[in-house]
Amino acid sequence: MVKLTRKQKEMERRATEILRVARPILVAEGFQCLSMDRVASQMEYAKGTIYKQFPNKEEIVLALAVQSMEVRRRLFEQAAMVAESSRYRMMALGAACEFFTQHCTDDFLVEQCIRNQSIWEKSSEQRQNLIRQCEGNCMGIVAGIVRDAVASNELVIPESLTPEEFVFGFWAINYGSQILTYSSPSLPAIGINDPFNAIRVHCCTLLNGFAWQPAMLILDYINAMKALNESLQPKFWSIKNQQNQSVN
Amino acid sequence: MVKLTRKQKEMERRATEILRVARPILVAEGFQCLSMDRVASQMEYAKGTIYKQFPNKEEIVLALAVQSMEVRRRLFEQAAMVAESSRYRMMALGAACEFFTQHCTDDFLVEQCIRNQSIWEKSSEQRQNLIRQCEGNCMGIVAGIVRDAVASNELVIPESLTPEEFVFGFWAINYGSQILTYSSPSLPAIGINDPFNAIRVHCCTLLNGFAWQPAMLILDYINAMKALNESLQPKFWSIKNQQNQSVN
DNA sequence: GTTTTTCTTGACGACTCGTCAACAATTGAC
DNA sequence: GTCAATTGTTGACGAGTCGTCAAGAAAAAC
Protein backbone atom coordinates (compact mmCIF):
# COMPACT_ATOMS: atom_id res chain seq x y z
CA MET A 1 0.00 0.00 0.00
CA VAL A 2 2.33 2.67 -1.22
CA LYS A 3 -0.44 5.22 -1.36
CA LEU A 4 -1.45 4.86 2.26
CA THR A 5 2.11 5.34 3.30
CA ARG A 6 2.36 8.41 1.16
CA LYS A 7 -0.74 9.78 2.82
CA GLN A 8 0.67 9.10 6.22
CA LYS A 9 3.91 10.75 5.26
CA GLU A 10 1.99 13.78 4.14
CA MET A 11 0.08 13.81 7.42
CA GLU A 12 3.26 13.64 9.38
CA ARG A 13 4.89 16.32 7.32
CA ARG A 14 1.96 18.55 8.06
CA ALA A 15 1.97 17.75 11.73
CA THR A 16 5.63 18.69 11.87
CA GLU A 17 4.87 21.90 10.04
CA ILE A 18 2.14 22.78 12.50
CA LEU A 19 4.47 22.24 15.40
CA ARG A 20 7.14 24.31 13.69
CA VAL A 21 4.69 27.20 13.53
CA ALA A 22 3.20 26.68 16.97
CA ARG A 23 6.40 26.36 18.95
CA PRO A 24 7.67 29.92 18.73
CA ILE A 25 4.22 31.26 19.57
CA LEU A 26 3.93 29.06 22.63
CA VAL A 27 7.43 29.87 23.80
CA ALA A 28 7.33 33.60 23.23
CA GLU A 29 3.75 34.40 24.10
CA GLY A 30 2.44 31.53 26.14
CA PHE A 31 -0.44 29.13 25.90
CA GLN A 32 -3.05 31.89 25.92
CA CYS A 33 -1.71 33.43 22.75
CA LEU A 34 -1.32 30.19 20.89
CA SER A 35 -4.52 30.14 18.88
CA MET A 36 -5.60 27.74 16.19
CA ASP A 37 -6.69 30.58 13.95
CA ARG A 38 -3.27 32.08 14.23
CA VAL A 39 -1.45 28.86 13.49
CA ALA A 40 -3.73 28.33 10.52
CA SER A 41 -3.19 31.80 9.16
CA GLN A 42 0.56 31.25 9.32
CA MET A 43 0.28 28.15 7.17
CA GLU A 44 -1.15 27.16 3.86
CA TYR A 45 -4.03 25.35 5.54
CA ALA A 46 -7.35 26.26 7.07
CA LYS A 47 -8.28 25.80 10.68
CA GLY A 48 -10.35 22.71 10.01
CA THR A 49 -7.35 20.96 8.54
CA ILE A 50 -5.33 21.63 11.64
CA TYR A 51 -8.10 20.18 13.75
CA LYS A 52 -7.83 17.05 11.59
CA GLN A 53 -4.25 16.74 12.67
CA PHE A 54 -4.60 17.73 16.31
CA PRO A 55 -7.99 17.47 18.00
CA ASN A 56 -7.27 20.52 20.17
CA LYS A 57 -4.75 23.10 21.21
CA GLU A 58 -3.64 21.07 24.17
CA GLU A 59 -2.66 18.17 21.97
CA ILE A 60 -0.32 20.45 20.06
CA VAL A 61 1.32 21.47 23.29
CA LEU A 62 1.82 17.88 24.35
CA ALA A 63 3.30 17.08 20.95
CA LEU A 64 5.71 19.97 21.35
CA ALA A 65 6.58 18.71 24.81
CA VAL A 66 7.39 15.28 23.41
CA GLN A 67 9.84 16.89 21.01
CA SER A 68 11.41 18.89 23.79
CA MET A 69 11.68 15.96 26.14
CA GLU A 70 13.38 14.04 23.39
CA VAL A 71 16.02 16.74 23.24
CA ARG A 72 16.49 16.39 26.96
CA ARG A 73 16.76 12.63 26.67
CA ARG A 74 19.43 12.82 24.00
CA LEU A 75 21.32 15.32 26.07
CA PHE A 76 21.10 12.97 29.04
CA GLU A 77 22.32 10.10 26.89
CA GLN A 78 25.29 12.10 25.77
CA ALA A 79 26.09 13.13 29.30
CA ALA A 80 25.78 9.60 30.61
CA MET A 81 28.39 8.44 28.10
CA VAL A 82 31.23 10.04 30.00
CA ALA A 83 33.65 7.20 30.69
CA GLU A 84 34.55 7.90 34.26
CA SER A 85 33.48 7.10 37.78
CA SER A 86 29.76 6.78 38.47
CA ARG A 87 29.87 9.93 40.52
CA TYR A 88 31.40 11.82 37.66
CA ARG A 89 28.68 10.56 35.38
CA MET A 90 26.04 11.69 37.84
CA MET A 91 27.65 15.08 37.85
CA ALA A 92 27.58 15.09 34.06
CA LEU A 93 23.84 14.64 34.26
CA GLY A 94 23.60 17.65 36.49
CA ALA A 95 25.55 19.52 33.85
CA ALA A 96 23.13 18.28 31.22
CA CYS A 97 20.24 19.70 33.24
CA GLU A 98 21.97 23.03 33.47
CA PHE A 99 22.79 22.94 29.79
CA PHE A 100 19.24 22.12 28.87
CA THR A 101 17.75 25.10 30.63
CA GLN A 102 20.49 27.43 29.49
CA HIS A 103 20.79 26.44 25.85
CA CYS A 104 17.44 24.82 25.14
CA THR A 105 15.44 27.36 27.04
CA ASP A 106 12.58 27.03 24.59
CA ASP A 107 12.38 23.33 25.20
CA PHE A 108 12.53 23.89 28.92
CA LEU A 109 9.62 26.29 28.73
CA VAL A 110 7.58 23.90 26.61
CA GLU A 111 8.25 21.11 29.10
CA GLN A 112 6.85 23.38 31.77
CA CYS A 113 3.54 23.80 30.04
CA ILE A 114 2.46 20.22 30.41
CA ARG A 115 2.63 20.53 34.20
CA ASN A 116 -0.50 22.58 33.84
CA GLN A 117 -3.29 20.32 34.90
CA SER A 118 -5.86 21.79 32.53
CA ILE A 119 -3.60 21.26 29.53
CA TRP A 120 -2.72 17.77 30.55
CA GLU A 121 -6.31 16.70 31.08
CA LYS A 122 -7.57 17.76 27.69
CA SER A 123 -5.12 15.77 25.65
CA SER A 124 -5.42 12.19 24.55
CA GLU A 125 -4.28 9.31 26.68
CA GLN A 126 -2.10 8.15 23.85
CA ARG A 127 -0.01 11.27 23.85
CA GLN A 128 0.01 11.35 27.63
CA ASN A 129 1.61 7.96 27.51
CA LEU A 130 4.25 9.23 25.12
CA ILE A 131 5.16 11.87 27.66
CA ARG A 132 5.23 9.38 30.48
CA GLN A 133 7.54 7.26 28.39
CA CYS A 134 9.90 10.18 27.78
CA GLU A 135 9.94 10.91 31.45
CA GLY A 136 10.57 7.27 32.23
CA ASN A 137 13.45 7.20 29.78
CA CYS A 138 15.16 10.15 31.38
CA MET A 139 14.66 8.68 34.81
CA GLY A 140 16.02 5.37 33.53
CA ILE A 141 19.26 6.93 32.41
CA VAL A 142 19.93 8.57 35.75
CA ALA A 143 18.72 5.67 37.84
CA GLY A 144 21.03 3.46 35.77
CA ILE A 145 24.00 5.47 36.93
CA VAL A 146 22.85 5.16 40.53
CA ARG A 147 22.49 1.40 40.16
CA ASP A 148 25.97 1.18 38.67
CA ALA A 149 27.31 3.14 41.61
CA VAL A 150 25.63 0.84 44.09
CA ALA A 151 26.83 -2.24 42.20
CA SER A 152 30.42 -1.02 42.27
CA ASN A 153 30.25 -0.03 45.95
CA GLU A 154 30.83 3.61 45.22
CA LEU A 155 27.49 4.48 46.80
CA VAL A 156 25.19 3.16 49.47
CA ILE A 157 21.62 4.34 49.19
CA PRO A 158 19.68 4.86 52.44
CA GLU A 159 17.52 1.83 52.91
CA SER A 160 14.22 3.63 52.69
CA LEU A 161 14.91 4.87 49.15
CA THR A 162 14.65 3.16 45.81
CA PRO A 163 17.25 4.25 43.25
CA GLU A 164 14.51 6.28 41.57
CA GLU A 165 13.63 7.98 44.82
CA PHE A 166 17.28 8.72 45.24
CA VAL A 167 17.28 10.34 41.81
CA PHE A 168 14.10 12.20 42.70
CA GLY A 169 15.97 14.43 45.11
CA PHE A 170 18.33 15.60 42.40
CA TRP A 171 15.51 15.93 39.96
CA ALA A 172 13.62 18.08 42.44
CA ILE A 173 16.50 20.34 43.32
CA ASN A 174 17.44 20.92 39.69
CA TYR A 175 13.93 21.29 38.42
CA GLY A 176 12.86 23.43 41.34
CA SER A 177 15.80 25.76 41.06
CA GLN A 178 15.31 26.16 37.36
CA ILE A 179 11.66 26.99 37.69
CA LEU A 180 12.41 29.47 40.42
CA THR A 181 15.24 30.98 38.42
CA TYR A 182 13.12 31.47 35.35
CA SER A 183 9.90 32.53 36.99
CA SER A 184 10.63 34.05 40.34
CA PRO A 185 10.19 37.78 40.45
CA SER A 186 13.72 39.05 40.73
CA LEU A 187 15.71 36.53 42.70
CA PRO A 188 18.58 39.00 43.16
CA ALA A 189 16.22 41.26 45.09
CA ILE A 190 15.96 38.63 47.81
CA GLY A 191 19.67 37.88 47.93
CA ILE A 192 20.10 35.17 45.33
CA ASN A 193 22.63 36.36 42.81
CA ASP A 194 23.92 33.17 41.23
CA PRO A 195 21.31 30.44 41.51
CA PHE A 196 23.22 28.10 39.23
CA ASN A 197 26.30 28.27 41.38
CA ALA A 198 24.18 27.76 44.48
CA ILE A 199 22.66 24.58 43.10
CA ARG A 200 26.05 23.25 42.11
CA VAL A 201 27.21 23.73 45.67
CA HIS A 202 24.13 22.01 47.02
CA CYS A 203 24.38 19.08 44.64
CA CYS A 204 28.01 18.53 45.47
CA THR A 205 27.22 18.68 49.17
CA LEU A 206 24.35 16.29 48.71
CA LEU A 207 26.51 13.80 46.84
CA ASN A 208 29.16 14.10 49.52
CA GLY A 209 26.47 13.74 52.15
CA PHE A 210 25.51 10.39 50.66
CA ALA A 211 29.23 9.56 50.61
CA TRP A 212 29.17 8.85 46.91
CA GLN A 213 32.79 8.05 46.13
CA PRO A 214 35.07 9.68 45.26
CA ALA A 215 34.25 12.64 47.52
CA MET A 216 34.88 16.02 45.98
CA LEU A 217 35.61 19.51 47.14
CA ILE A 218 33.03 22.05 46.13
CA LEU A 219 35.52 24.02 44.09
CA ASP A 220 36.61 20.96 42.14
CA TYR A 221 32.99 20.08 41.55
CA ILE A 222 32.20 23.51 40.18
CA ASN A 223 35.16 23.43 37.84
CA ALA A 224 34.29 19.96 36.63
CA MET A 225 30.74 21.11 35.99
CA LYS A 226 31.97 23.96 33.87
CA ALA A 227 34.09 21.61 31.80
CA LEU A 228 31.26 19.14 31.40
CA ASN A 229 28.89 21.89 30.41
CA GLU A 230 31.25 23.00 27.66
CA SER A 231 31.83 19.48 26.46
CA LEU A 232 28.13 19.22 25.68
CA GLN A 233 28.20 22.19 23.37
CA PRO A 234 29.65 20.42 20.29
CA LYS A 235 27.16 17.59 20.64
CA PHE A 236 24.32 19.98 20.96
CA TRP A 237 23.66 20.80 17.34
CA SER A 238 23.53 17.29 16.10
CA ILE A 239 20.97 16.63 18.81
CA LYS A 240 18.86 19.59 17.85
CA ASN A 241 18.92 18.65 14.19
CA GLN A 242 17.40 15.27 14.85
CA GLN A 243 14.32 17.01 16.12
CA ASN A 244 12.18 16.64 13.00
CA GLN A 245 11.14 13.11 13.56
CA SER A 246 8.03 11.12 14.25
CA VAL A 247 5.53 13.32 15.91
CA ASN A 248 2.15 11.67 15.81
CA MET B 1 -13.75 61.47 56.57
CA VAL B 2 -15.93 58.73 57.93
CA LYS B 3 -17.79 58.38 54.66
CA LEU B 4 -14.72 57.80 52.58
CA THR B 5 -13.63 55.12 54.96
CA ARG B 6 -17.03 53.49 54.77
CA LYS B 7 -16.77 53.47 50.98
CA GLN B 8 -13.35 51.95 51.15
CA LYS B 9 -14.60 49.35 53.58
CA GLU B 10 -17.37 48.49 51.20
CA MET B 11 -14.86 48.21 48.36
CA GLU B 12 -12.67 45.93 50.38
CA ARG B 13 -15.59 43.83 51.47
CA ARG B 14 -16.50 43.36 47.84
CA ALA B 15 -12.95 42.55 46.81
CA THR B 16 -12.86 39.90 49.50
CA GLU B 17 -16.16 38.53 48.29
CA ILE B 18 -14.88 38.33 44.71
CA LEU B 19 -11.83 36.41 45.85
CA ARG B 20 -14.00 34.11 47.91
CA VAL B 21 -15.96 33.24 44.79
CA ALA B 22 -12.96 33.09 42.47
CA ARG B 23 -10.71 30.90 44.58
CA PRO B 24 -12.56 27.60 44.34
CA ILE B 25 -12.98 28.04 40.60
CA LEU B 26 -9.30 28.70 40.09
CA VAL B 27 -8.27 25.82 42.32
CA ALA B 28 -10.67 23.24 40.98
CA GLU B 29 -10.83 24.14 37.32
CA GLY B 30 -7.80 26.24 36.59
CA PHE B 31 -7.14 29.66 35.20
CA GLN B 32 -8.86 28.90 31.90
CA CYS B 33 -12.17 28.26 33.58
CA LEU B 34 -12.03 31.25 35.86
CA SER B 35 -14.12 33.72 33.90
CA MET B 36 -15.30 37.14 34.91
CA ASP B 37 -18.81 36.39 33.71
CA ARG B 38 -18.90 33.38 35.91
CA VAL B 39 -17.63 35.18 38.97
CA ALA B 40 -20.17 37.92 38.32
CA SER B 41 -23.04 35.51 37.94
CA GLN B 42 -22.14 33.92 41.27
CA MET B 43 -22.42 37.26 43.01
CA GLU B 44 -24.92 40.03 43.40
CA TYR B 45 -22.92 42.27 41.07
CA ALA B 46 -22.50 42.71 37.35
CA LYS B 47 -19.32 42.16 35.43
CA GLY B 48 -18.57 45.85 35.13
CA THR B 49 -18.52 46.19 38.89
CA ILE B 50 -15.99 43.43 39.18
CA TYR B 51 -13.81 45.18 36.65
CA LYS B 52 -14.00 48.24 38.90
CA GLN B 53 -12.45 46.19 41.64
CA PHE B 54 -9.92 44.22 39.61
CA PRO B 55 -8.81 45.51 36.22
CA ASN B 56 -8.45 41.98 34.85
CA LYS B 57 -8.56 38.31 35.60
CA GLU B 58 -4.86 38.14 36.25
CA GLU B 59 -5.11 40.70 39.00
CA ILE B 60 -7.60 38.47 40.79
CA VAL B 61 -5.18 35.60 40.59
CA LEU B 62 -2.36 37.67 42.03
CA ALA B 63 -4.64 38.83 44.82
CA LEU B 64 -5.47 35.22 45.60
CA ALA B 65 -1.78 34.41 45.56
CA VAL B 66 -1.09 37.15 48.08
CA GLN B 67 -3.64 35.58 50.41
CA SER B 68 -2.10 32.16 49.94
CA MET B 69 1.44 33.35 50.44
CA GLU B 70 0.31 34.99 53.63
CA VAL B 71 -0.85 31.63 54.87
CA ARG B 72 2.54 30.23 54.04
CA ARG B 73 4.26 33.07 55.81
CA ARG B 74 2.26 32.57 58.99
CA LEU B 75 2.98 28.90 58.88
CA PHE B 76 6.66 29.66 58.49
CA GLU B 77 6.50 32.06 61.42
CA GLN B 78 4.88 29.42 63.57
CA ALA B 79 7.45 26.86 62.55
CA ALA B 80 10.35 29.22 63.18
CA MET B 81 9.16 29.73 66.75
CA VAL B 82 10.32 26.30 67.83
CA ALA B 83 12.69 26.95 70.74
CA GLU B 84 15.49 24.58 69.91
CA SER B 85 18.73 24.39 68.03
CA SER B 86 18.99 26.28 64.76
CA ARG B 87 19.11 23.03 62.88
CA TYR B 88 15.93 21.90 64.49
CA ARG B 89 14.27 25.15 63.52
CA MET B 90 15.43 24.69 59.94
CA MET B 91 13.90 21.27 60.00
CA ALA B 92 10.68 22.76 61.32
CA LEU B 93 10.58 24.96 58.26
CA GLY B 94 10.89 21.93 56.06
CA ALA B 95 7.95 20.50 57.97
CA ALA B 96 6.03 23.71 57.37
CA CYS B 97 6.64 23.33 53.63
CA GLU B 98 5.34 19.80 53.74
CA PHE B 99 2.38 20.87 55.80
CA PHE B 100 1.56 23.69 53.46
CA THR B 101 1.31 21.49 50.39
CA GLN B 102 -0.50 18.75 52.23
CA HIS B 103 -3.03 20.75 54.21
CA CYS B 104 -3.23 23.99 52.27
CA THR B 105 -3.19 22.34 48.89
CA ASP B 106 -5.48 25.02 47.50
CA ASP B 107 -3.08 27.72 48.54
CA PHE B 108 -0.19 25.78 47.09
CA LEU B 109 -1.97 25.53 43.76
CA VAL B 110 -2.79 29.21 43.74
CA GLU B 111 0.83 30.05 44.47
CA GLN B 112 1.75 28.00 41.43
CA CYS B 113 -0.37 30.07 39.10
CA ILE B 114 1.65 33.21 39.46
CA ARG B 115 4.72 31.44 38.09
CA ASN B 116 2.95 31.64 34.77
CA GLN B 117 4.65 34.41 32.90
CA SER B 118 1.55 35.52 31.01
CA ILE B 119 -0.43 35.90 34.22
CA TRP B 120 2.35 37.72 35.95
CA GLU B 121 2.87 40.19 33.13
CA LYS B 122 -0.70 41.35 32.89
CA SER B 123 -1.08 42.38 36.50
CA SER B 124 -0.20 45.69 38.05
CA GLU B 125 3.24 46.47 39.34
CA GLN B 126 1.71 47.32 42.67
CA ARG B 127 0.37 43.86 43.23
CA GLN B 128 3.53 42.33 41.83
CA ASN B 129 5.40 44.14 44.55
CA LEU B 130 3.07 42.73 47.15
CA ILE B 131 3.97 39.26 45.96
CA ARG B 132 7.66 40.04 45.94
CA GLN B 133 7.27 41.27 49.48
CA CYS B 134 5.57 38.06 50.59
CA GLU B 135 8.30 36.06 48.97
CA GLY B 136 10.92 38.21 50.63
CA ASN B 137 9.26 37.73 54.00
CA CYS B 138 9.34 33.97 53.71
CA MET B 139 12.93 34.05 52.60
CA GLY B 140 13.73 36.35 55.47
CA ILE B 141 12.39 33.93 58.03
CA VAL B 142 14.46 31.04 56.75
CA ALA B 143 17.57 33.08 56.08
CA GLY B 144 17.27 34.36 59.63
CA ILE B 145 17.61 30.84 60.95
CA VAL B 146 20.65 30.30 58.77
CA ARG B 147 22.23 33.50 60.04
CA ASP B 148 21.55 32.45 63.62
CA ALA B 149 23.19 29.13 62.93
CA VAL B 150 26.26 30.80 61.50
CA ALA B 151 26.41 33.25 64.37
CA SER B 152 26.30 30.44 66.93
CA ASN B 153 28.89 28.36 65.04
CA GLU B 154 26.50 25.55 64.40
CA LEU B 155 26.92 26.01 60.68
CA VAL B 156 29.56 27.17 58.25
CA ILE B 157 28.24 28.23 54.87
CA PRO B 158 30.47 27.57 51.85
CA GLU B 159 32.14 30.84 51.02
CA SER B 160 30.59 31.24 47.60
CA LEU B 161 27.05 31.29 49.01
CA THR B 162 25.07 34.04 50.67
CA PRO B 163 22.70 32.85 53.40
CA GLU B 164 19.86 33.35 50.92
CA GLU B 165 21.62 31.24 48.31
CA PHE B 166 22.07 28.62 50.97
CA VAL B 167 18.33 28.72 51.60
CA PHE B 168 17.71 28.60 47.88
CA GLY B 169 18.85 24.99 47.70
CA PHE B 170 16.27 23.93 50.25
CA TRP B 171 13.64 26.07 48.62
CA ALA B 172 14.40 24.44 45.28
CA ILE B 173 14.35 20.88 46.54
CA ASN B 174 11.11 21.37 48.43
CA TYR B 175 9.36 23.37 45.80
CA GLY B 176 10.59 21.17 42.97
CA SER B 177 9.56 17.98 44.68
CA GLN B 178 6.14 19.35 45.47
CA ILE B 179 5.51 20.47 41.94
CA LEU B 180 6.64 17.14 40.61
CA THR B 181 4.55 15.29 43.16
CA TYR B 182 1.42 17.21 42.29
CA SER B 183 1.84 17.42 38.56
CA SER B 184 3.99 14.60 37.36
CA PRO B 185 2.09 11.94 35.51
CA SER B 186 2.13 9.03 37.92
CA LEU B 187 5.35 9.15 39.84
CA PRO B 188 4.86 5.60 41.15
CA ALA B 189 5.01 4.35 37.57
CA ILE B 190 8.62 5.44 37.37
CA GLY B 191 9.62 4.07 40.74
CA ILE B 192 8.87 6.91 43.12
CA ASN B 193 6.45 5.68 45.73
CA ASP B 194 6.94 8.05 48.62
CA PRO B 195 8.25 11.38 47.37
CA PHE B 196 7.77 13.06 50.73
CA ASN B 197 9.91 10.52 52.48
CA ALA B 198 12.53 10.81 49.75
CA ILE B 199 12.78 14.55 50.19
CA ARG B 200 13.09 14.21 53.93
CA VAL B 201 16.01 11.87 53.43
CA HIS B 202 17.61 14.26 50.99
CA CYS B 203 17.15 17.28 53.20
CA CYS B 204 18.62 15.50 56.19
CA THR B 205 21.56 14.36 54.09
CA LEU B 206 22.04 17.86 52.76
CA LEU B 207 22.02 19.37 56.24
CA ASN B 208 24.49 16.73 57.38
CA GLY B 209 26.54 17.41 54.25
CA PHE B 210 26.88 21.02 55.28
CA ALA B 211 27.76 19.77 58.76
CA TRP B 212 24.99 21.78 60.36
CA GLN B 213 25.23 20.80 64.03
CA PRO B 214 23.95 18.71 65.64
CA ALA B 215 24.22 16.01 62.99
CA MET B 216 21.25 13.68 62.77
CA LEU B 217 20.53 10.19 61.63
CA ILE B 218 18.02 9.97 58.82
CA LEU B 219 15.59 7.98 60.93
CA ASP B 220 15.67 10.50 63.74
CA TYR B 221 15.14 13.26 61.23
CA ILE B 222 12.12 11.59 59.75
CA ASN B 223 10.57 11.03 63.14
CA ALA B 224 11.22 14.58 64.18
CA MET B 225 9.62 15.79 60.97
CA LYS B 226 6.50 13.80 61.68
CA ALA B 227 6.25 15.30 65.14
CA LEU B 228 6.80 18.80 63.84
CA ASN B 229 4.23 18.29 61.15
CA GLU B 230 1.66 17.29 63.72
CA SER B 231 2.54 20.13 66.02
CA LEU B 232 1.52 22.54 63.28
CA GLN B 233 -1.96 21.13 63.03
CA PRO B 234 -3.46 22.90 66.06
CA LYS B 235 -2.02 26.23 64.93
CA PHE B 236 -3.36 25.73 61.49
CA TRP B 237 -6.94 26.83 61.95
CA SER B 238 -6.18 30.07 63.66
CA ILE B 239 -3.90 30.84 60.75
CA LYS B 240 -6.52 30.06 58.17
CA ASN B 241 -9.12 32.16 59.93
CA GLN B 242 -7.01 35.27 59.70
CA GLN B 243 -7.24 35.07 55.96
CA ASN B 244 -9.98 37.65 55.46
CA GLN B 245 -7.81 40.68 55.69
CA SER B 246 -6.60 43.54 53.58
CA VAL B 247 -6.71 42.51 49.99
CA ASN B 248 -6.35 45.55 47.80
C1' DG C 1 -15.85 10.79 -18.62
C1' DT C 2 -18.47 9.89 -14.69
C1' DT C 3 -19.21 8.44 -10.09
C1' DT C 4 -17.59 7.80 -5.53
C1' DT C 5 -14.77 8.74 -1.93
C1' DT C 6 -11.83 11.49 0.54
C1' DC C 7 -10.02 16.03 1.91
C1' DT C 8 -10.39 21.01 2.78
C1' DT C 9 -12.66 24.95 3.90
C1' DG C 10 -14.36 28.96 6.40
C1' DA C 11 -18.91 30.45 8.25
C1' DC C 12 -21.13 29.32 12.46
C1' DG C 13 -22.63 28.89 17.55
C1' DA C 14 -21.19 29.32 21.98
C1' DC C 15 -18.23 31.45 24.86
C1' DT C 16 -14.42 34.73 26.35
C1' DC C 17 -12.48 39.54 27.76
C1' DG C 18 -12.70 44.24 28.70
C1' DT C 19 -15.31 48.74 27.49
C1' DC C 20 -18.53 52.25 27.88
C1' DA C 21 -22.89 54.73 27.11
C1' DA C 22 -26.97 54.72 29.54
C1' DC C 23 -29.29 54.21 33.58
C1' DA C 24 -29.78 54.27 38.95
C1' DA C 25 -28.48 55.78 43.52
C1' DT C 26 -26.44 58.87 46.56
C1' DT C 27 -24.95 63.23 47.95
C1' DG C 28 -25.13 68.08 48.77
C1' DA C 29 -27.23 72.71 48.13
C1' DC C 30 -30.95 75.38 48.89
C1' DG D 1 -38.45 68.37 50.75
C1' DT D 2 -36.80 69.20 46.08
C1' DC D 3 -33.61 69.09 42.58
C1' DA D 4 -29.09 69.21 40.40
C1' DA D 5 -24.51 67.07 40.50
C1' DT D 6 -21.82 63.45 41.36
C1' DT D 7 -20.87 58.87 41.88
C1' DG D 8 -21.84 53.93 41.18
C1' DT D 9 -23.85 50.02 38.45
C1' DT D 10 -25.19 47.70 34.54
C1' DG D 11 -25.31 44.58 30.63
C1' DA D 12 -25.14 45.05 25.52
C1' DC D 13 -21.31 45.42 22.58
C1' DG D 14 -16.88 44.66 19.61
C1' DA D 15 -13.16 41.79 19.03
C1' DG D 16 -11.42 37.47 19.40
C1' DT D 17 -11.43 32.56 21.14
C1' DC D 18 -12.52 27.24 20.31
C1' DG D 19 -14.23 23.41 17.98
C1' DT D 20 -17.89 21.82 14.42
C1' DC D 21 -19.76 20.66 10.20
C1' DA D 22 -22.30 21.29 5.76
C1' DA D 23 -20.89 22.39 1.41
C1' DG D 24 -17.64 22.59 -2.02
C1' DA D 25 -12.99 20.95 -4.16
C1' DA D 26 -9.82 17.31 -5.28
C1' DA D 27 -8.48 12.69 -5.91
C1' DA D 28 -9.50 7.94 -6.72
C1' DA D 29 -12.05 4.34 -8.69
C1' DC D 30 -14.46 2.68 -12.24
Image: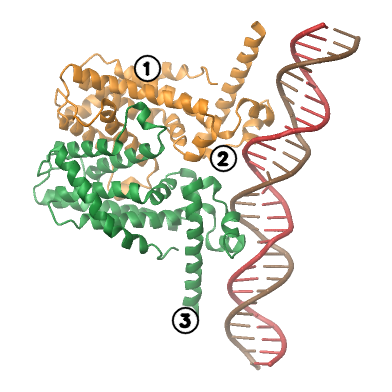
Chain colours: A orange, B green, C brown, D red
Q: Position of residue B11 (x, y in %)?
A: 50, 69
Q: Which of pointers 1 and 3 indicates the residue nearer the eye?
A: 3
Q: Label 1's element?
A: helix
**Which three-letter amino acid code belongs to the residue tagged 3?**
Val
Characterize the local packing of mark 1: few (<14), some (14-19) or many (20 or more) Cα atoms within 10 angstroms.
some
- Mark 2 falls within which chain? A
Q: Residue at horizontal 62%, vertical 25%?
A: A53
Residue that carries the numbered disc 1 in the rendered image: A235
The residue shown at (32%, 54%) is B72
Identify whether A212 is placed above or below B132: above
Please determine whether, in this image, residue B42 is positioned above or below residue B139.
Answer: below
Residue A16: give x, y in percent of width and height: 57, 22
Residue of label 3: B2
- C-alpha separation, residue under disc 1 versus residue under disc 3: 70 Å
On the same chain, marks 2 and 3? The answer is: no
Question: Which label was assigned to residue A33?
Answer: 2
Secondary structure found at label 2 = helix
